[in-house]
Image (cartoon, rainbow, N blue to C red):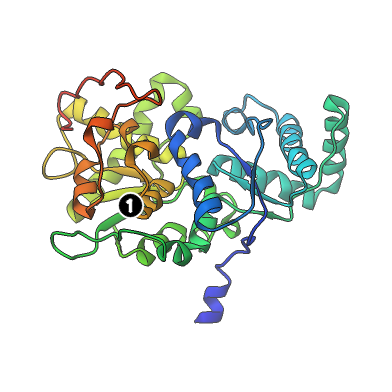
Amino acid sequence: MKRYWNEYQKNIADDKYFYERSCIRQTFFPGSEAAFLRMLREELGKDIYDSENQHTCTGIGYHADVVPIETTMTVVARLFSLMTEAGYENYVPSCVTSFGIFSEMTEIWKEHPETLEKTREYLWKACKREFEVPKNIAHPSDIIYKFRYELKDKMKYQLVNRFTGKPLKVVEHIGCHYAKIFPEKGVGKAEFPYVLAGMIEAWGGDVVDYPERRHCCGFGFRQYLVQENRGYCVANSKKKFESMEAYEPDFIVANCPGCAMFMDKWQYTIAEMEGKTYDREGYGIPVLTYEEMAGLLLGYDPWQLGLQLHQVQSERLLDMIGIAYNPDEKYMGVSGKVLSTPEKPHNLLV
């Protein structure tokens, strides 16, 4: 059995990472990327490089059939050239869509070497740059998973309800572009994805196994880009919420920025449309990124992590774990002044 499970593991580099930020994560959850860099540098003592010259991988445009594959290959090559120029070989893309893009392009280059040479030619003609293909490509959730026990030793809190002493019930959601496009690229592959479940179990929580556990969140770039088709997106998330509701999860954690954003925002949408929430009290189910989950347990300030940017608010979860926070600083800007307070939803309690 142990030998069989070894087939579902992946090689994750130990150190010396080139970090590539995500365009949509910078908009949705900017505190998550800052928390990841802090964890690697301050908690784990790792060497991770964050270049100011990086840019989009074209993922949304590529999957929406707007950007041709040759252009995507050239853009990916320029990102790899930044890594090569900085002297790194281990590439860490923040977004699972980027992770899928890089996995796809490098697999094509491996199977069809002539496309790699064409890409080198296109990049040189475009900007006189050269690149090497990374030796290791790992998603940040892979790295947090790899060092989950080292981080546990530094954590101030656990995924435990301090009032009952029982493990928190956590729904984990794996992004489709992490373990479904190229199953062998993810921990546990598409059959037994363990990258988030491993964190939850290591940090004291229980993983909720519910019928629609592997169902897509519904993002799907092409349908969401057309406003009239967005009903398909919300219907997918609603199917998941209805399936998990009976298990009364304490929160949801995702490793895809789109998934985290949609399962958070659609709860507000459904509450406004139907007056329905999927918890008993009417507050909704908090949705965290894996960096937010880890950061909270390490004792990072919830507002620096950016939890106030979520639609479903997290104070009840913080209280359940026993995490300290200052409510007066929730909407405070870097200047120290409180910014404008957002309007409260009609049906979703905050």
Describe the element under mark 1 as helix, strand or loop.
loop
Hey, which quadrant is residue 340 in on the image?
top left
In depth, the one of 188 and 254 nearer the eye is 254
Residue 270 position within the rendered picture, expressed as x and y whole percent measured from the top left: 23, 31
| Amino acid residing under circle 1 | Glu
Residue 254 position within the rendered picture, expressed as x and y whole percent measured from the top left: 40, 47
Q: Is residue 148 visible?
A: yes
Query: Is 61 situated above or below 142?
Result: above
In depth, the one of 319 and 217 nearer the eye is 319
Number of on-image labels: 1
**Residue at the extreme front:** 336
The residue at 45%/39% (across/down) is: 257
The residue at 51%/28% (across/down) is: 222
Query: Is 25 situated above or below 150?
Result: above
Q: Is residue 192 visible?
A: no
Give the residue number, with chain letter if any, for mark 1: 212
The residue at 19%/42% (across/down) is: 278
Name the quarter where the C terminus is drawn: top left
Query: Is 70 situated above or below 45?
Result: above
Residue 216 position within the rendered picture, expressed as x and y whole percent measured from the top left: 41, 44
In depth, the one of 108 and 86 nearer the eye is 86
Dot 1, crowdedness within 10 Å: few (<14), some or many (≥20)? some
In depth, the one of 88 and 118 nearer the eye is 88
**Residue at the extreme left:** 281
Residue 125 position within the rendered picture, expressed as x and y whole percent measured from the top left: 88, 27
The residue at 24%/38% (across/down) is: 326
